[in-house]
Image (cartoon, rainbow, N blue to C red):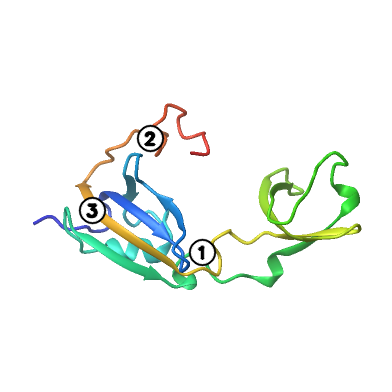
Amino acid sequence: MEKVENGSYISVEYTGTLQSGHVFDSSQGRHPLEVHMGAGKMIKGFESQLLGMALNEKKVFTLSPEDAYGPKNADMMQLVPRSEVPPDMDVQVGMIVGLVTPEGNQVPARVVQLDDEELTMDLNHPLAGESLTFEIEIVGISSTPTQEAGSCPSGCDCSGDCCE
């Protein structure tokens, strides 16, 4: 019986939920997630749970923040003067905005607090500090990729550029 091992390409149907039961991501209605084992493209806890599983095997597991997106880091909170926000932008708590780094890269940040003088922005990954529960099923094991490079996991024809 074929088992998941490093170097193989694994197709996984999955649903990810938070402790509250809220579904934060799922492959339902899309192509399965393809994981190249050992390539380091997935959160470490997810990949380690796949090792040794067999085709059509199902599993439910919970990852601690340390094995997922890490704990919340207080150093990732940034104060932004209100004067740097475009005047026509209706900023609200909870809103995700793009901040531009000195190198010109855009980084998503969540507004966590605001007043007339400044905004407090959280630059942590949105799932940092969260325990994540996954319900998975291995639906394919291959020695080569089964999805086109650059293809979109949602199954559309955007070549991986859409936000799903």
Regarding mark 3 in the picture, which secondary structure is present there?
A: strand
Regarding mark 1 in the picture, which secondary structure is present there?
A: loop
> Relative to residue 155, is residue 124 drawn left or right?
right
> Looking at the picture, does residue 28 appear above or below residue 45?
above
Return the disc, 3 or 2, that comes first in the chain's sequence. Answer: 3
Read off the residue under disc 3.
Answer: 138
Q: CA distance from mark 1 to mark 3?
A: 23 Å
What residue do we see at 28% from left, 40% from top? 145
Read off the residue under disc 1.
Answer: 69
**Closer to the camera in the image, 37 or 57:** 57
- The location of residue 79, given as percent across then percent down, is 81, 61
Read off the residue under disc 2.
Answer: 149
Return the disc, 1 or 3, that comes first in the chain's sequence. Answer: 1
What residue do we see at 34% from left, 57% from top? 38
Type of amino acid under label 2? Ala
Evaluate if marks 1 and 3 touch, with contact meaning CB atoms under 8 Å apart.
no
Type of amino acid under label 1? Tyr
Count residues near mark 1 (Cα–Cα under 10 Å), then give few for <14, some for 14-19, many for 20+.
many
